[in-house]
Image (tube, helix red, strand yellow):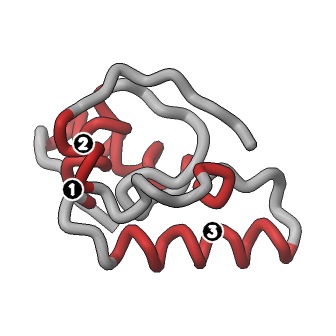
Amino acid sequence: MMKFELEQESWMLEGACSSMDSDLFFPIGSSMKAMKQIAEAKAVCNECSVKLDCLEYAISTNQDSGVWGGATEDERKTIRREYRKTGKLVSY
């Protein structure tokens, strides 16, 4: 199991993922197994009350791996570009 040392934000304790194995949110590669893992992680995010806080955190701290706020690395790149242009955070 991977451990990530992040500065704890208060909203993180409220995350639907807070008591789950973090490996789910950090799939490796683009295999069918990884795609299934991404879908499972996004399903957790979609039920989460702090999804937008999580996405904002990922964008503002340049998280470049994993599923954050329901968005993958590639989706966050698109969101980040749009944010830089418009100043608005568009969630997935």
Contact check, label 3 and label 2, Cβ < 8 Å: no
Q: Is residue 72 left or right of residue 52?
A: right
Between 2 and 38, which is closer to the camera in this rendering?
A: 2
Say which quadrant the C terminus sits in.
bottom left
Between 15 and 64, which is closer to the camera in this rendering?
A: 15
Please name the residue shown 63% across and 68% down the image.
38
> Element type at marker 3?
helix
Please name the residue shown 18% across and 36% down the image.
10
Mark seen at residue 61: none
Q: Tell me the residue that label 3 is attached to.
A: 38
> Element type at marker 1?
helix
Q: Tell me the residue that label 2 is attached to.
A: 56
Q: What residue type is labelled 1?
A: Leu
In the current view of this chain or complex, which residue is farthest to the front?
A: 19
Q: In this view, does 32 lie to the left or right of 16?
A: right
Give neighbour class at mark 1: few <14, some 14-19, many 20+ (Cα, 10 Å): some
Q: Is residue 79 left or right of residue 39?
A: left
* Percent of width and height locating residue 25: 59, 55
Q: Tell me the residue that label 1 is attached to.
A: 52
Contact check, label 1 and label 2, Cβ < 8 Å: yes
* Percent of width and height locating residue 57: 28, 36
Contact check, label 1 and label 3, Cβ < 8 Å: no
* Percent of width and height locating residue 79: 35, 50
**Real-space Cα distance between discs 3 and 2?**
19 Å
The quarter of the picture where residue 64 lies is top right
Exactly how many numbered labels are in the figure?
3
**Real-space Cα distance between discs 1 and 3?**
18 Å
> Element type at marker 2?
helix
**Real-space Cα distance between discs 1 and 2?**
6 Å
